[in-house]
Image (spheres, helix red, strand yellow):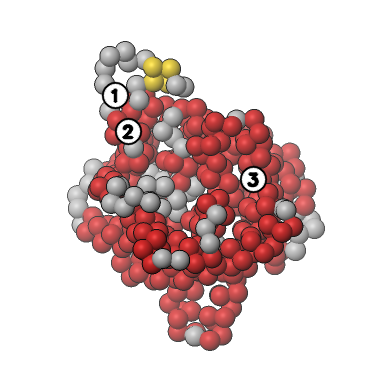
């Protein structure tokens, strides 16, 4: 990909729909299951990724002319891990109880294929502003995916949303908040999006 | 260091807290290379070797480098650096010493650098304060667990190729649901050993 010709708004839409990290590209899947047993965790994780993705894209775009192409991957990794440390410490300071349950997964944003991929494919070839919007789009796409997954898992598995109980006396399906339920939820949602696409006459993106 | 504790550590890391099925790490690679048995076996072997070496190296760097200097907050940056460097070094050494092996397993090495388990193990070791030997055994257990997961999944997916699946479920969605069922089976290991 050479310098992009897409407008800022198109870049954001691209990240949310056409190249949605989880449902379309099927990468960076670990947190999509690990932290989505509750809506609150899912949303906060999404926000952390949005932050890291945007900052990394901007940093790489600023540095793109001084990075030697032979050592670009290690440089990208260092930039990413720097911003992940920022997100990690920020979470540890301001969202203590959430951090306790998902701290390891915040630290592991560092090994996200999607962030490295955007740095390599987009930010290292584009100016700062498009890179920022690309990061925002990708991050929002991730956030939306996590929100959808955790919405259904918490609603069905715990009968509550954002920790507020909704069902009254009805017993929730505990299986949805267990590891198994996470795999089921993602699988069924992916199948649903494929089905929507098939109805629209397009072939599914991944096989 | 009693043997029983190390044994427990290996069993716990490989079966009870299996990284793929109960902690959902390394899923990208798990779904990526579990399509064929041959690649799954190759990946498992390479993975295990890199895992043990990186667990040991990161432990040394953490306890003799970061702790005395009081810069443990840099552990994410440092571990990523150590792992990436290790992968690069083993890649070069393997190519020099055993081109045969490199031809077979070299591809997986490049993939491993972006695997979250390989970073999660040193981070867990540092967080739990394991000793050097314990860290190594934790690495062995985790590598073993990932290998078991890959091989189970590959053998199922080879059969699934022949099945007649509804169109929207073909590919990844079905792989996810299959993994969910295996994960359900793995919950049966909980309580096997109390640490």
Residue under label 3: A84
Q: At numbered mark 3, what does the secondary structure look like: helix, strand or loop? A: helix
Q: Residue furthest front?
A: B2
| In this view, A106 is above or below A43 | below
- Relative to B128, is B10 on the left or the right? left
Q: Earlier along the polypeptide chain: callout 3 or callout 1?
A: 3
- Residue B131: numbered disc: none
Q: Earlier along the polypeptide chain: callout 2 or callout 3?
A: 3
- Which residue shows up at 73% across the image and 39% down it? A129
User: Does any portion of residue A109 appear in the rendered image?
Assistant: no
- Residue A176: numbered disc: 2
| In this view, A167 is above or below B118 | above
Q: Are marks 2 and 1 in contact (CB under 8 Å)?
A: yes
Of all chains, the one bearing label 3 is: A
Evaluate whether label 3 is on the same chain as label 1.
Answer: yes
Q: At numbered mark 1, what does the secondary structure look like: helix, strand or loop? A: loop
- Which residue shows up at 66% across the image and 45% down it? A85
Q: In the rendering, at what x and y percent does residue B22 appear?
A: 37, 47
Alpha carbon distance from label 2 to label 3: 29 Å
Q: In the rendering, at what x and y percent does residue B84 appear?
A: 60, 64
């Amino acid at each position: 990909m050479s310098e992009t010709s897409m407008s800022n708004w198109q870049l954001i839409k691209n990240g949310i729909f056409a190249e949605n990290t989880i449902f379309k590209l099927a990468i960076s899947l670990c947190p999509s299951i690990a932290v989505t047993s509750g809506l609150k965790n899912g949303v906060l994780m999404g926000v952390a990724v949005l932050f890291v993705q945007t900052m990394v894209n901007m940093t790489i775009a600023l540095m793109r002319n001084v990075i030697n192409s032979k050592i670009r991957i290690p440089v990208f990794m260092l930039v990413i891990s720097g911003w992940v440390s920022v997100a990690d410490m920020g979470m540890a300071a301001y969202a203590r109880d959430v951090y306790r349950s998902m701290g390891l997964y915040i630290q592991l944003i560092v090994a996200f294929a999607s962030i490295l991929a955007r740095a390599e494919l987009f930010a290292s070839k584009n100016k700062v502003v498009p890179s920022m919007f690309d990061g925002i789009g990708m991050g929002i796409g991730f956030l939306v995916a996590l929100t959808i997954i955790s919405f259904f898992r918490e609603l069905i598995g715990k009968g509550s949303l954002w920790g507020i109980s909704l069902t009254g006396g009805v017993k929730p399906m505990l299986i949805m908040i267990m590891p198994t339920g996470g795999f089921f939820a993602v699988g069924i949602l992916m199948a649903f999006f494929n089905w929507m696409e098939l109805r629209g006459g397009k072939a599914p993106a991944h096989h | 260091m009693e043997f029983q504790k190390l044994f427990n550590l290996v069993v716990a890391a490989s079966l009870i807290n299996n990284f793929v099925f109960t902690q959902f790490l390394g899923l990208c690679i798990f779904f990526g290379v579990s399509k064929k048995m041959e690649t799954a076996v190759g990946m498992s072997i390479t993975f295990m070797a890199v895992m043990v070496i990186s667990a040991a190296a990161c432990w040394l760097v953490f306890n003799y480098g970061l702790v005395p200097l009081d810069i443990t907050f840099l552990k994410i940056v440092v571990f990523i650096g150590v792992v990436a460097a290790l992968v690069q070094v083993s890649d070069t050494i393997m190519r020099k010493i055993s081109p045969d092996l490199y031809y077979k397993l070299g591809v997986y090495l490049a993939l491993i650098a972006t695997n979250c388990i390989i970073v999660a193990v040193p981070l867990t070791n540092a967080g739990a304060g394991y000793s050097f030997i314990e860290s190594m055994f934790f690495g062995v257990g985790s590598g073993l667990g990932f290998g078991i997961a890959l091989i189970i999944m590959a053998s199922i997916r080879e059969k699934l190729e022949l099945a007649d699946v509804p169109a929207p479920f073909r590919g990844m969605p079905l792989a996810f649901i299959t993994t969910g069922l295996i994960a359900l089976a793995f919950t049966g290991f909980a309580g096997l050993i109390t640490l």
